[in-house]
Image (spheres, helix red, strand yellow):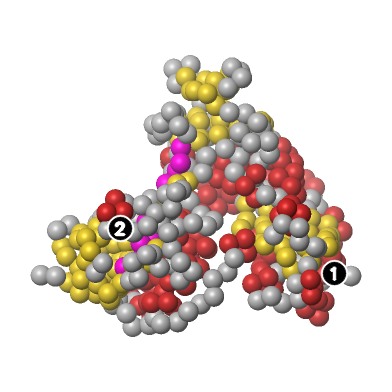
Amino acid sequence: MMQKFDIAIIGGGTGGYRAAEILASHGKKVVLFEKSNIGGVCLNCGCIPTKALIASAEVIEQMKTSEKFGIKSSHEIDFSKIMARKEKIVKMLTLGLQKKLAKMGISIINKEAFIKGENLIISDNEEYSVENIIIATGSVDAGLRGIDFDGEDVLSSKDILSLNEVPQRLLVIGAGVIGSEFSTVFSYMGSKVTLLEFLPKPFFSTRSSLIMNEGEKILKKSGIDLKTSSSVASIDKEKKMVILSDDSRLEYDKVLIATGRIPVVNSDAKNLGIEITDRGFIKTNNNKQTNIENIYALGDCTEGPMLAHKAYYDAYIASFHILGENEEQMKMCDVPYSIFTIPSISHCGLSEDMCIEQKINYRKIESSYAENGRAATYEARQGIFSMLIGENDRILGVTIIGKESDTLIHEIIPLIHNNIPYTALKRTIHIHPTLSEIIQEALF
């Protein structure tokens, strides 16, 4: 017997479950298909577990500098307990999400689903008639051509989260966000980390010289051996050796390939005639509709930054369009992001390089963590606040590099998204002494 629903969502990651929550809260009957674990990559093997490990690395960093605070401390690391804590956090959040979705009346089918028509889904030989379909199938590790993941020595970003011990020598390929965060974690935990990057600088995709240059300093200060303009020719697994294009050789115990991610687009979508871009993403309009108007796509399987919060935003846009409301789509450069190195790097809007490239007039205001009283109490004086101002005092972009940048940047994000002049910040009283005063100190 065919089951009937208002909405079918394929993929239970951040975008998929957020759309399910929004639509169910507005009275829609929703079925959510997820062949693996609810929460997707972010909750199970991405954002959350890696940040749990970063938190442990931050504690190690504090212990190493504890004598500056007048506290003597030994910093013996119990890696098994660190990993157990990570798993506990993931299980707690996953269970909480499952209970929330069930309480909202969302039907969860833990099986693969296939689109067989504009209004028809088949899963495990069951048929589902639906009014709208949302594709939220996410992404997977891109890997490296000619070198396969084996889960033992050559690891993906998912594999490395299951290690039983800290590798003595970790070689990481790719100095983007994923590679740099894992390099940071394992360097603080005692690995000798070598980080290889094909391009001349880490974080090259940010198109920000400030982030590239300051990020390079942060990685090196974290004890990471960063080698840029380096490409891998092959891996000799027997000798546990990576051979570079210049024929130099690097020994390793484990290799992490962190060369980015690629979208997951199933053949059923293509067979139905859904348009795909040259780069393999599902093509959508500003409402996240595909060329088939009742079928939507969002998150990593569509163009734009592969970030969980961008998928949340996509879910918001798509869901309210289905509900009959049009929400204005933001520019992709205005999607904020943070890189969780130690300290963190956060950005929203245009970089100085982008302004120069696009011939946009701007002026820059800056302040330093070194001048901030609260930063001094934390022994966290490494950092910078930099904001670009354009015509009519509008904020073009902001970069914060330093302790708690991932939180501090949220004071600026609403001004960028709502086109509010930066002068509004001058009328804001910042509590003293706090790190937030780095913003105030740049204004006058």
Residue type at mark 2: give it: Gly
Which residue was labeled with disc 1? 443
Q: Which portion, as a residue range, is magenta?
A: 133-143
Return the x and y of residue 113 as percentages of the image width and height.
25, 58
Which numbered circle lies on residue 273? 2
Res 189 quadrant in image: top right
Q: In this view, does 94 lie above or below 20?
A: above
Does the magenta portion include 348? no
Q: In this view, does 52 lie to the left or right of 301?
A: right
Is residue 239 found left or right of 116 in the rendered image? Answer: right
Q: What residue type is labelled 1?
A: Leu
Taking depth in this image into account, of 250 and 85 the one nearest to the observer is 250
Q: Does the magenta stretch include residue 142?
A: yes
Residue 198 falls in image quadrant: top right
User: Residue at the spot x=62%, y=60% of the render?
Assistant: 333
Mark 2 lies on a secondary structure that is loop
The x and y percentages for residue 361 are 80, 62
Q: Quadrant of residue 384?
A: bottom right
Q: Residue furthest right?
A: 444
x%, y% of residue 44?
A: 42, 53
What residue sits 66% from the left and 32% below the top? 228
Label 1, label 2: how many angstroms apart (C-alpha)? 53 Å
Residue 17 visible in the picture:
no
Q: Residue furthest left?
A: 1
* Pair 1/2: label in front: 2
Badge number at residue 22: none
Quadrant of the rendering where the N terminus is positioned: bottom left
**Crowding near the residue tagged with mark 1, few <14, some 14–19, many ≥20 C-alpha atoms within 10 Å:** some
